[in-house]
Image (cartoon, rainbow, N blue to C red):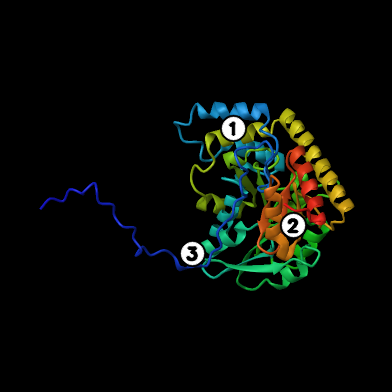
Amino acid sequence: MSTTPDPDVVPAPSETIRVRSVLEELPAYVAGKPAAEDRSRRFKASSNESPFPPVAAVRDAAAAGLEVTNRYPDAAAHELREALGTKHGVDPSQIALSTGSVAVTGDLVRALVDQGDEVVYPWRSFEAYPILVGSHGGVSVQVPLTAELEYDLDAMAAAVTDRTRLIILCTPNNPTGASLSTAQIEAFLGAVPEDVVVAIDEAYREFHDPATVAGTAGIFRRHGNVVLLRTFSKLQGLAGLRIGYAVAHPRLARALSQVTVPFGASIPAQTAALMSLRGDVQQELDRRAVWIREERSRVLSALAEQGWQMPSAQGNFVYFPLGEQTTEFAEFADRRGLVLRAYGTDGVRATIAEQEANDLLIEVARAWRERRPA
């Protein structure tokens, strides 16, 4: 009997494949909705992306990296880790690289959390946290924000148990925008056992008011259980290249190197990130950060004049705590050409994007309050 497959027979999809039961309970990560291809009057303000393309020297470095992508990247990323070690005043071995700070967070969970161990973080915060924790067998302990959408650090400290292995503090917090001060973080660390790792996710640090941004470098030096998470996706404009890193103490840095995906940081990503650290490029990035902070202030001032009461904003976004009106507002904006990020029945996040997009956000917010017909 012939065993040659019949090319006209399409196998039925298997419903007997056994996947992990935890996947049935995991939320799906919802990426920011893209704008339509016709951008004449449509803007994407749903993903906290930079409105600027990469600096020319960075773009050229990434393009040059493409010339050798027939080779594997340097798995240890020696040159980039040397530069980042110098930037942060640590040994290069204390820099752990991966495909964005979200991937480094996943590495932290893999390195620290056994089945049934707990990870404490505020809620609402970055929606990848519950996915990363649950998919690796951990238990999420979500501590609600206060009524003002600030961190409830006392409640977070009280939530720590013998099974807690990791705490995540996102500052500025995505999507609500609130941030933590040096004093707040220090007081919190004083209430947390020293064997519980505290990850400070600083994906939006560059957009914070420099006069009040937390001194996390000093916090890291003073506390052996602190790890800092950074990304090149936001201000540097390298979201599409996927590269981020952790600054960790030696034992944890070694653990992260054991669990991360080999060759995760591509050659174009490494070369672009390295170029982003060059002095003249940093100066241009600083100018862009100032522009975004000024645009954020302009938007918030205009919204305040309309009567909006907005929470604190220190990222490259603002947050509308609309509750049950969340979906309606996002759809209202979408019909007018502005794509925003809706969060269930909690609120809507709007990225500080191109000036035209920010102008449209102000226009949409005014129209919403006046309830003009669509």
Lateral position of residue 371 relative to residue 81, left or right = right
Please tell me which of labels 2 and 3 falls first in the chain.
3
Q: Of 57 and 49, which appears nearest the observer?
A: 49
Lateral position of residue 323 relative to residue 267, left or right = right
Looking at the rendered structure, which numbered label has been put on residue 1? none
Q: Secondary structure at mark 2?
A: loop
**Residue identified by numbered label 3:** 23
Lateral position of residue 211 relative to residue 217, left or right = right
Q: CA distance from mark 2 to mark 1?
A: 33 Å
The reply to whether dot 3 and dot 1 touch (C-beta < 8 Å) is no
Q: Secondary structure at mark 1?
A: helix
Residue at 79% across, 34% down: 287
Q: Position of residue 301 (x, y in %)?
A: 87, 48
Q: Residue furthest left?
A: 1
Residue 5 appears in view: yes
Q: Position of residue 230 (x, y in %)?
A: 67, 47
**Residue identified by numbered label 1:** 271
Residue at 76% across, 57% down: 320
Name the kind of residue labelled 3 in the image.
Answer: Leu
